[in-house]
Every structure is written in structure tokens, then in C-alpha cells.
Amino acid sequence: MTAVAPRRSVLAVRGDERRRRRDRLAGEEPMEIRAAGPGQAPAPVAVTMRTPGDDFELAAGFLVTEGLVAPDGVTRAAYCDDVPDEQQRFNVVTITSRARVDEVAQRRVATSACGICGKARLDEVEVACAPLPDGPAVARSTLLGLPGALRARQAVFEDTGGLHAAGVFDVEGRLVALREDVGRHNAVDKVVGAAALAGELPLSERILLVSGRAGFEIVQKAAVAGVPILAAVSAPSSLAAEAAERLGMTLVAFLRGDGFNVYSRPERLVLD
């Protein structure tokens, strides 16, 4: 399902000229994510602001990258029927897990939001992640071609200018999956969720490119999904670089034009 981009009347001012026109905006609505395992009633885990579209992938990816559901543990995704407001029915998604959901971890995710200490979270991520593989080897020319390939396929961004994108590429630079969302983390969760629902995790032979900056949570989500090479068009944070180094991930940032910076594990890149 393509990301939603509703139209709205706007007053456009250009120099001395003013005119009314229809503009397309990046859709944004809240979505509640619920989780349940065998013998468990669906329980709320989080509410995220997202661009409607690919909702099942977003919910599955969020639960996998937050460590509540195993990469191969999603058995069902569905909108909820018990929402009193019919208009909100498609803003509540329940993911059913093959195994029981850890209720303590579930409460932690539901209450922590961005307030959890990055250092403590990094320790948890290291425990949850399988070691990232040594490969693949990716050529410099392949990396340089990724932003253009991503931008060329950002259909909703072209209409709105207001969405982030995450793209999964193979080692030859071919785009495998792309998702857009008003939230950077949501776009990553959507591509990871798509792989989880298709039984394609871990992404051990893939490159993940994000259209914005690379923060700690982006590195965390990529690591849980088994991504060995993460690239960003914009800057990384200090904790993101530290996390990538500790987790064994190659982190590339400021990937634009004819250059980029490598912040960790450059051995996967063929730079000659």
C-alpha cells in the first residue's frame, strides 16, 4: 500500500504573486501497535505517529527491531475490530507472535519512548543481536549510486517533499525494497517488517540506506535485522557511530555527490 498523501488548499506566495492552489501533504496519523502470543490477549505496546500505508509491515518491524518478537516469529497481522470509533479501526494493528511476548519487556517499550539511556540500551541490543557477518564486500561506485536510486523511486516524496525513506539494496546496488514515512524510524521499521513478513530476515547480504541522518535507534534497528552495512545521506550521531563499531556494523554517512565518510568497520568497502 502506497503512503498516503492527502491534498489541501494552500496560499502560495512567490514574490508579489499570490495564488490559491492544491498541494499534497505527507499524511500523518497515530497508530497503536498491539502484540499477543499464545494464550495472551492483545496488549498495547506503543503508539507511533506514522504515514498511513504498509501498516502491518510497520507494526511487525517495530516489534522485531524492539526485540519483542523474534525475526521469524510473526504469524499474523491484522487491524483490530474492537475499536469503538470506526474511523480509528485502521489505526490499530495487532501482531500475533509464534512465542509468548515478554510482558516485562513489553511494558519497558511502552513506557520508555526516547527516554531510555542509550548506553543501557546498547547493552540490550548487543544481547539481542546475532553477530553481524564479515561480508559482503561493496564497491565505492555502488555506494555512490544508492542515493540517486533511492530518490528516483520516492514517489510520494516527489509529491509532498515531506517523507523520509529507507531502502534495502543488494550488494550490486539494486533496490530490493523501499518504504516512505513521515518518521525516519518508521520507514526503517517498514522495510524490516516487509522482510520479516516475507521470511527474509536476517538481511545479512543487504545494504540499508536512509534518506536522513543516522541516529542510535536506526543503528539498533538495522543491527537487529542483521544489516551489515548502513548508509545515510546525512550525519550520524556520536552514539550511532559507537554502537555501529561495537556491533560490528559498517556505518557510512554524508553519502552524497562523489563522496562519503566511513565511521566504523571500513573493511567491507572496496575503496580502490
Image: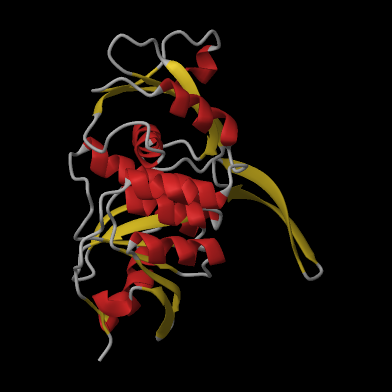
Residue 242 coordinates in the image, percent (x, y): 47, 65
Q: Quadrant of residue 96?
A: top left
Q: Quadrant of residue 140?
A: bottom left
Residue furthest to the right in view is: 16
Residue furthest to the bottom in view is: 272
Q: Is 19 displayed left or right of 88 in the figure? A: right
**Image: 268 above or below 68:** below
Determine if residue 91 is in view.
no
Q: Is 152 displayed left or right of 216 in the figure? A: left
Q: Is 270 displayed left or right of 163 in the figure? A: left
Image quadrant holding the C terminus, namely: bottom left
Residue 124 coordinates in the image, percent (x, y): 42, 44
Q: Quadrant of residue 114?
A: top right
**Image: 114 above or below 102:** below
Determine if residue 223 is in view.
yes
Residue 89 coordinates in the image, percent (x, y): 47, 17
Judging depth in this view, the residue of 265 and 166 nearest the camera is 265
Image quadrant holding the N terminus, namely: top left
Which residue is pictured at 40% across the width and 58% down the height? 154
**Image: 200 above or below 252:** above
Coloration of the structure image:
secondary structure
How many labels sit on residues?
A: 0
Residue 220 coordinates in the image, percent (x, y): 42, 51
